[in-house]
């Protein structure tokens, strides 16, 4: 069998079909119902048989036809981790769109691994949702092939790694946000500005710090690598890296915290060292979680429209399932971030 | 047909069965497959027919037999609202148990109504989860009958209203928590202690304020109704009711805030009025959300083991589905709360 196809299969579905289910079965040396079982995520297929069938499905770029008819009224939403208040903003956005479409949301966590495991992909194949939204959580090659062969569309929100140009994704203008946060501090008169970044393997945190660097360089200030610390988007790291930054004899008078939770960690470090915010230290966060308004002093931060981003991701994945946005495999949508000035930023101290 | 039952049906399943599917069909004047369709939540049944069948299912206390065999690998988790950071703690607990059991979690919101709507119940009946966990969200009589007739077990977590003695539920020792919070303030020497309660229709918030009253009365202090304000568990209300309390000429020197978000609202009200915490005002929260540790000063609060409560609810609902805890219809489990003393409480001001 080659990748050329009989005319008869070419006309059956709208998607490019390189082999029928019967042809896959013949090539794998199994019955057509066995291939169906694999496609339906059924457990009663020997692992070796399943691997062989999956391999052929992938090699032929098989796509299930008429997938719409057999879909469950579900959308899958997968998080890298459910630790953060961040996640709730995203859940709410997906719920909004799902409710309007009469769908329910299945929530999973890839439990600290950046790629959901094989078991998860099998479960998804078995329950046949209308689509999958991956949040900060990429899909490996085999997971992607598995969803594609079942015609289950997927969208990546704010990708942790480079999602690849063939994966539709929704993000925010992280670079612009880092630029705006740092320019705000420059305009207040700060000249020693530190940063605590998120994890370096996440594109969003790299982009924020690159925006910070661009603001300094275009502002005519040198970038001091000693003032850039690496975090993991958690409060505890903001606190520890904050202490390290603020204990330096040449401590910065302002810090771009990378996200709101790290900013709160910086607050704690400043309290511990007896530094007042903003009199002794200015702090800018990123995200604009509800808590940013509630802390004392209320946090100046870069608003990321998380709920709107999640709504956009949910709408995109449903459109993909209807065959709209056929060219959307290359879609990358970035929603705008915006600086929200509150009370944690001010002029540098006289001696600073 | 009466509620007496033929011996033949009595022996078929473990549950009490008062009528067979065929008998329900005959009485409703429809075919047995039509009754099946209603049980499976299929849309292709006339509304009047469906109502008649549902009414008979309820009247006969019909319970689907062998429900285990046809269940989807899902647990339904329903929130009254997804606004709060509170919800994330609960989601994490249910995810923990679901993952170990090989199940996925379907998340819904009853969108501000205290009882999930009919559409939701139909969706649940159609997807046949292993069980349903309702968080601060009761089920009305017809929703309860619908789940019961499909043999879908359910558990209520921290009920908003009185769940009824026949509904298994998981809660925390709210009354003990209110008592401990207020006794802590009494021991510090406060004699004018205010309270901002949660919504009065929620049993958990009534119990907390009752614990507050009991501490005052057993401490020999009068309960001043003017110092008890009603809130809704949101930050904004803590702020507004906090302003009202703190602007009184005889303002309290300490406030039991009802929950952590209202405590943060009180923080903001105190800042606005130039009152220092804890020097001028002591504040105690309830929940111990992650943010309680992060605010300045870190919040003294009553820890409610939300994740453990959610785990207990998920385990209970799975046990009910296996026919274990057969007598659990009357189960009410309360996990212990505990006072966590941080820096928002201290002795009253000298003049206070």
Image (tube, coloured by chain):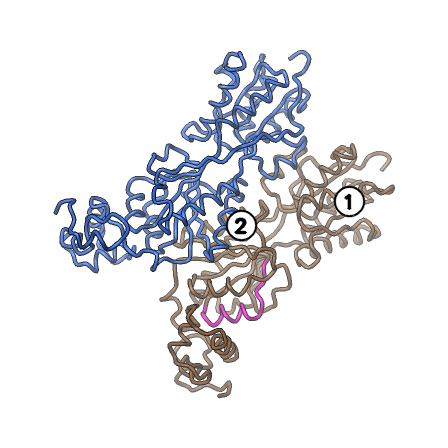
Chain colours: A blue, B brown
| SS of the residue under disc 2 | helix
- Quarter holding the C terminus of chain B is top right
Residue A33 left/right relative to B352? left
Spot occupied by residue B39 in the image (x, y as percentages of width and height): 43, 71
Image disc number at residue A255: none
Spot occupied by residue A131 in the image (x, y as percentages of width and height): 39, 50
Query: Mark 1 — residue?
Result: B186
Host chain of mark 2: B
The residue lying furthest to the left in this view is A1
| SS of the residue under disc 1 | helix
Q: Nearer the viewer, residue B282 or B173?
A: B282
**For the residues marked 2 and 1, what is the alpha-carbon distance in whole angstroms?**
32 Å
Tell me which label, 2 or 1, sits earlier in the chain.
Answer: 2
Residues flagged by tags 2 and 1 on a common chain: yes
Image disc number at residue B90: 2
Residue A262 left/right relative to B318? right
Quadrant assignment, res A157: top left
User: What secondary structure characterizes most of the magenta part?
Assistant: helix
Host chain of mark 1: B
Spot occupied by residue B95 in the image (x, y as percentages of width and height): 46, 50
Neighbor class of circle 2 (other Cα within 10 Å; few <14, some 14-19, many 20+) is many
Question: Which residues are drawn in magenta?
Answer: B137-151
Q: Nearer the viewer, residue B151 or B21?
A: B21
């Amino acid at each position: 069998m080659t990748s050329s196809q009989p005319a008869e299969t070419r006309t059956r579905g709208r998607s490019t079909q390189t082999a029928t289910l019967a042809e896959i079965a013949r090539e794998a040396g199994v019955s057509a119902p066995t291939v169906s079982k694999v496609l339906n995520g059924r457990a009663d297929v020997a692992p070796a048989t399943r691997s062989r069938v999956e391999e052929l499905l992938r090699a032929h770029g098989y796509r299930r036809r008429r997938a719409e008819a057999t879909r469950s009224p579900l959308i899958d939403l997968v998080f890298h981790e459910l630790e953060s208040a961040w996640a709730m903003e995203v859940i709410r956005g997906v719920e909004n769109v799902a409710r309007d479409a009469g769908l329910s949301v299945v929530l999973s966590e890839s439990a600290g691994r950046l790629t959901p495991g094989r078991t998860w992909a099998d479960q998804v194949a078995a329950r046949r949702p209308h689509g999958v939204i991956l949040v900060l959580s990429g899909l490996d090659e085999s997971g992607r092939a598995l969803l594609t062969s079942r015609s289950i569309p997927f969208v990546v929100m704010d990708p942790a790694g480079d999602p690849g140009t063939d994966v539709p994704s929704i993000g925010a203008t992280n670079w612009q946000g880092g630029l705006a946060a740092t320019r705000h501090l420059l305009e207040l008169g700060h000249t020693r500005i530190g940063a605590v970044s998120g994890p370096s393997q996440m594109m969003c945190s790299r982009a924020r710090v690159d925006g910070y660097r661009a603001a300094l360089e275009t502002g005519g200030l040198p970038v001091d690598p000693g003032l850039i610390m690496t975090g993991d988007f958690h409060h505890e790291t903001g606190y520890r890296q904050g202490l390290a930054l603020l204990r330096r004899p040449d401590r910065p008078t302002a810090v771009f915290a990378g996200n709101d939770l790290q900013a709160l960690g910086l607050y704690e470090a400043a309290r511990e060292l007896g530094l007042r915010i903003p009199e002794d230290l200015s702090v800018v966060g990123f995200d604009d979680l509800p808590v940013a308004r509630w802390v004392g002093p209320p946090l100046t931060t870069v608003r990321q429209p998380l709920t709107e981003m999640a709504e956009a991701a949910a709408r995109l994945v449903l459109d993909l399932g209807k065959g709209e946005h056929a060219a959307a495999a290359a879609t990358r949508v970035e929603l705008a971030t915006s600086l929200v000035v509150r009370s944690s930023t001010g002029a540098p101290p006289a001696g600073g």
